[in-house]
Amino acid sequence: MPEGDAVYRTAARLRQALDGRVLTRSDFRVPRHATADLSGRRVLTTVSRGKHLLTRVEGGLTVHTHLRMDGSWRVIPAGRRPAPGDVVRLVLANERWQAVGIRLGVVDLLKTVEEPRVVGHLGPDLLGDDWDPAEAVRRLRGDLDRTIGEALLDQRNLAGIGTIYRAETLFLRGIWPWRKVREIDDLEGVVTLAHRLLDANKAHAGTITTGDRRPTDQTWVYGRFGRPCRRCGTRISRGEMGTRSQERLILWCDNCQPR
């Protein structure tokens, strides 16, 4: 699933193509909003909120989308047909550009004043103006017996982190993912590092946590199962965390992140 930095970049692309321009076409290919028509309305802006996207248009309306696992937004010239095989869920077009939503996990249309209904449950956005490490720590401490690995992925605690940044953050802090929140002495250090990692990657594609841009050397543990740890040489371990049907991938080094 695209993480907060990728969604942040997507919002920037949508702003560049749509902001301030009048829509000449909208095509909602979801049953609930199949008859909705935003033509003639000016797009005000698109903002990211964690992993959610909010495109606001004139008339007090917001298009709410979420990429989930397979979704993406592509910006192409107006009039050009999407690539064959694309599963298009939404099109927002003006005279110059069209934003094509492919395999979007969520497509919704709501009043702008109702945005809290879809994003109000989220914790502080790691890449948002409201980022507040103290509030993120307060929310994490709301369940002291939860594993830190699960707590970090809960978007109600802090919004935008996913499996890649979870693994990288916990490795860099030397924390075994199954440790309880109550056992972590410096939670503020954990969330602050996560913020720094996402912020460092928000302006470019890819996830680089090592400082090395070579494709095979960009991360410490994520994507490196069975390979030697860059620090100690121990083979990187892989597992799953979370309740049944909600399990998510986790990678760690048994030596650098001791139990």
Image (cartoon, rainbow, N blue to C red):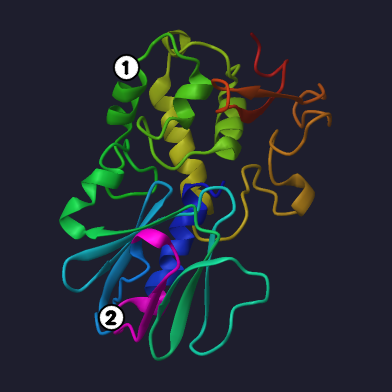
What x and y, as percent, mark residue 197?
52, 43
- Is 51 situated above or below 109? above
Q: Report if residue 22 lies within the magenta region.
A: yes
Q: Which mark is residue 131?
A: none
Q: Residue at x 68, y 41 (%)?
A: 219
In the image, what residue type sits under mark 2? Gly
Determine crowd level at label 2: few under 14, some 14-19, many 20+ residues with C-alpha closer than 10 A.
Answer: some
Circle 2 — which element? Answer: loop
What x and y, as percent, mark residue 129?
28, 50
Left or right position of 202 against 134: right
Q: Mark 2 and 1 residues: CB-CB less than 8 Å, in contact?
A: no
In the image, what residue type sits under mark 1? Gly
Residue at mark 2 to residue at mark 1: CA–CA distance: 42 Å
Q: Which mark is residue 142?
A: 1
Q: Nearer the viewer, residue 245 or 171?
A: 245
Q: Quadrant of the C terminus?
A: top right
Residue under pointer 2: 20
Q: Image quadrant of residue 23? A: bottom left
Q: Which residues are magenta?
A: 16-32
What x and y, as percent, mark residue 143?
36, 14
Q: Residue at x 57, y 48 (%)?
A: 69
Q: Image quadrant of residue 223? A: top right
Determine crowd level at label 1: few under 14, some 14-19, many 20+ residues with C-alpha closer than 10 A.
Answer: few
What x and y, as percent, mark residue 38?
29, 76
